[in-house]
Image (cartoon, helix red, strand yellow):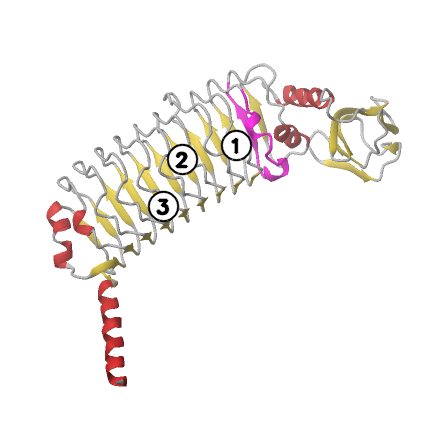
């Protein structure tokens, strides 16, 4: 009896190896429809290709011959197939080990066929597919381990089909998709490990009017760049973004009128430069994230060629001070005299205590930091010049210019 049981287990294990068989460690290139059609005959039982898969051929019109394929161990490239209209045939594919590239298949209308793909370990690139209108077919994709690059797809209008995507380990790069009107479809995305880049080549006209669709995005590991989006009116959609790890650049957006959408970014998380340039209709830049960064910058500041009110660092600093002072929801904390020489007196009209003060020089460096303040502080050690003083009281902050005289 034990012999029969052992024989049965051997048969089961053997069958398992047949139905889930690794093969082609050196990869394979398909350059004709005939090679696609003959795959299951030429490589019987091959379901997990350990190497690369390259699909490129003028007469390749369908991928049905690859219906047994479940895994590509390295990269999968589907490129320059002018007769290909669908990815049906890849329906059992669930993992691409390295990167997936779908490029310059001019008659490909959707990505149906990739419905079981859950993970791309390295990066996903979709480029130059001029009949593709959205990402339908990637409905179960949850994770891209590296970069997600979408560029020069002239007909894509939305990110519909990517509703399950939560994490991008590298950058999200969206460039020269001129028909793109919305980012809806990325609503589940919460983090980008590296850069967010959304833009167009200078001189191209794009249809994107807002960043709605990124509403659940909270963290970006590196830079944020919004470049030459000719129809972008505001930054709504980034309202929940609190942390970025590099430079913030808003440049060349012709009709941008509001950057209120980035107000919740923590200024200290902008670990490099701040650039707000060449947005001719942008006159209001005194949002919290920008004001806080200007008070204590971590890098270079470049603000110019915007509308009056946001046309220089000085204009924005002045607007920040006015906006803070006029915000009636905050307690009226005052300093006097101003200009001051040796002693600065602090008070609050409603009796709130001042818990902490910070004073910054013109380079954004903290030159004085005190806690447990009573009614006055000694500033006699400060050199003559202009400073920014911040007063903290029970969660409120008031920021003022402070002139110190000899």
Between tags 2 and 1, which lies in front?
Answer: 2
Q: Which residues are magenta?
A: 258-279
Q: Is residue 252 above or below residue 131?
A: above
Dot 2 or dot 1, earlier in sequence: 2
Q: Which sits in the foreground, 157 or 122?
A: 157
Which residue is the site of mark 1?
238
Q: Is residue 41 above or below residue 376?
A: below
Label 1 crowd bin: few (<14), some (14–19), many (20+), radius 10 Å: many
The C terminus - image quarter: top right
- The percent position of residue 127, horizontal first and vertical second, equals 31, 36
Alpha-carbon distance for marks 1 and 3?
24 Å
Q: Quadrant of residue 218?
A: top right
Label 2 crowd bin: few (<14), some (14–19), many (20+), radius 10 Å: many
Which residue is the site of mark 3?
140
- The percent position of residue 166, horizontal first and vertical second, equals 45, 44
Image position of 119 (left or right of 56)? right
In the picture, the disc for residue 158 is none
Helix, strand or loop at label 3? It is loop
The answer to whether residue 355 is seen in the rendering is yes
**Cβ atoms under marks 2 and 1 closer than 8 Å:** no
Image position of 55 (left or right of 379)? left
The residue lying at 60 percent from left, 39 percent from top is 269
The residue lying at 87 percent from left, 26 percent from top is 341
- The percent position of residue 277, horizontal first and vertical second, equals 52, 23
In the picture, the disc for residue 185 is 2
Dot 1 or dot 3, earlier in sequence: 3
The residue lying at 27 percent from left, 38 percent from top is 103
């Amino acid at each position: 009896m034990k012999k029969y049981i052992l024989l049965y287990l051997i048969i089961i294990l053997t069958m398992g190896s047949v139905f889930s068989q690794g093969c082609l460690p050196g990869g394979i290139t398909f350059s004709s429809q005939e090679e696609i059609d003959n795959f299951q005959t030429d490589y019987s039982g091959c379901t997990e290709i350990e190497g690369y898969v390259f699909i490129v051929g003028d007469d390749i019109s369908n991928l049905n011959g690859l219906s047994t394929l479940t895994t590509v161990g390295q990269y999968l490239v589907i490129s320059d197939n002018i007769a290909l209209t669908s990815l049906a045939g890849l329906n059992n594919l669930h993992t691409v080990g390295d990167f997936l590239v779908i490029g310059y298949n001019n008659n490909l209308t959707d990505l149906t066929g990739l419905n079981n793909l859950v993970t791309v370990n390295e990066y996903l690139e979709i480029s130059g597919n001029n009949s593709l209108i959205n990402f339908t077919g990637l409905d179960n994709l949850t994770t891209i381990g590296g970069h997600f690059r979408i560029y020069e797809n002239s007909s894509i209008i939305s990110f519909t089909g990517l509703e399950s995507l939560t994490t991008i380990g590298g950058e999200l790069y969206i460039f020269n998709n001129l028909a793109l009107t919305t980012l809806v479809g990325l609503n589940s995305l919460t983090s980008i490990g590296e850069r967010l880049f959304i833009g167009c080549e200078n001189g191209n006209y794009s249809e994107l009017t807002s960043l709605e669709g990124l509403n659940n995005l909270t963290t970006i590991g590196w830079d944020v760049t919004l470049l030459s989006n000719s129809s972008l009116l505001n930054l709504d959609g980034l309202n929940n973004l609190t942390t970025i790890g590099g430079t913030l650049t808003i440049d060349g957006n012709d009709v941008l009128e509001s950057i209120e959408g980035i107000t919740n970014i923590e200024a200290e998380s902008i670990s490099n430069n701040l650039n707000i340039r060449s947005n001719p209709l942008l006159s209001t830049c005194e949002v919290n994230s920008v004001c806080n960064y200007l008070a204590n910058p971590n890098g270079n500041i470049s603000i110019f060629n915007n509308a009056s009110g946001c046309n220089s660092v000085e204009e924005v600093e002045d607007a920040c001070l006015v906006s803070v002072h006029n915000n009636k929801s905050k307690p009226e904390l005052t300093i006097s005299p101003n200009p001051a020489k040796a002693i600065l007196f602090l008070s609050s009209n409603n009796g709130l205590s001042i818990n902490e003060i910070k004073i910054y020089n013109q380079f954004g460096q903290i030159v004085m930091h005190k806690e447990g303040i009573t009614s006055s502080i000694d500033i006699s050690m400060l050199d003559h010049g202009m400073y920014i003083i911040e007063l903290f009281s029970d969660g409120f902050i008031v920021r003022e210019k402070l002139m110190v005289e000899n």
